[in-house]
Image: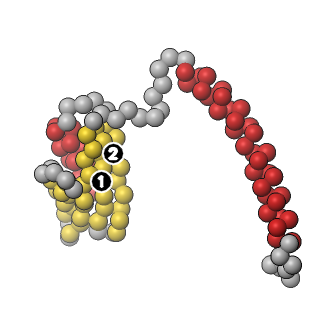
Amino acid sequence: MGVYTFVCRSSGDEWTAKQLKGELEASAATHYELQRRLVAAASAADSAAGVQSSFAMVTPSSAVFQVIIGAVGGGAAIGGGAAAGGAAAGGAAAEAPKAEEKKEEEKEESEDDLGFSLFD
């Protein structure tokens, strides 16, 4: 599994990216095309299967892009485990609204304890 982190910058009509710790680089007219080229470069450097990526703008002209090669997504399920897990999660989800209702009631009471109201 390989993790490739890139610092991306825009200057004029071009986006450029340099790997944070390494020698991979790329440039393109748009940040979308730059992401595609960086994924291709990282995939060529690491032969493992499975690719995940994350792009986050830091400023309008800079961003951080991360490519993870060989990672398996959380949505994958083998066999009947997904059905059993879904049923267990459904029961827990049904109990969660009850707890939220109690919290809302407590909040209303605590506003009265302050001795003033927002709308007075």
Q: Residue furthest left?
A: 23
Circle 1: element type: strand
Disc 1 residue type (three-letter): Phe
Q: Is residue 36 visible?
A: no
- Residue 68 shows up from this direction: yes
Q: Give the residue displayed 47% in from the left and 32% down from the top.
A: 75
Q: In this view, does 110 lie to the left or right of 50?
A: right
Q: Earlier in the sequence, mark 2 or mark 1?
A: 2
**In this view of the protein, which residue sits in the foreground, 45 or 1?**
1
Q: For numbered disc 2, what is the local secondary structure?
A: strand
Q: Residue at x 45, y 28 (%)?
A: 76
Q: Where is residue 8 in the image (x, y as percent from the top left)?
A: 25, 60
- In the image, is 97 to the left or to the right of 74? right
**Residue nearest the observer in this picture, 38 or 13:** 38
Residue 65's tag is 1
Q: Position of residue 57 (x, y in %)?
A: 35, 62
Q: Distance between the residues labelled 2 and 1?
A: 7 Å
Q: Is residue 116 above or below residue 20?
A: below
Q: Do the residues labelled 2 and 1 touch (CB within 8 Å)?
A: yes
Q: Nearer the viewer, residue 57 or 14?
A: 57
Q: Is residue 106 rendered to the left or right of residue 50?
A: right
Crowding near the residue tagged with mark 2, few <14, some 14–19, many ≥20 C-alpha atoms within 10 Å = some
Task: Give the quadrant of the N terminus.
Answer: top left
Residue corresponding to mark 2: 53
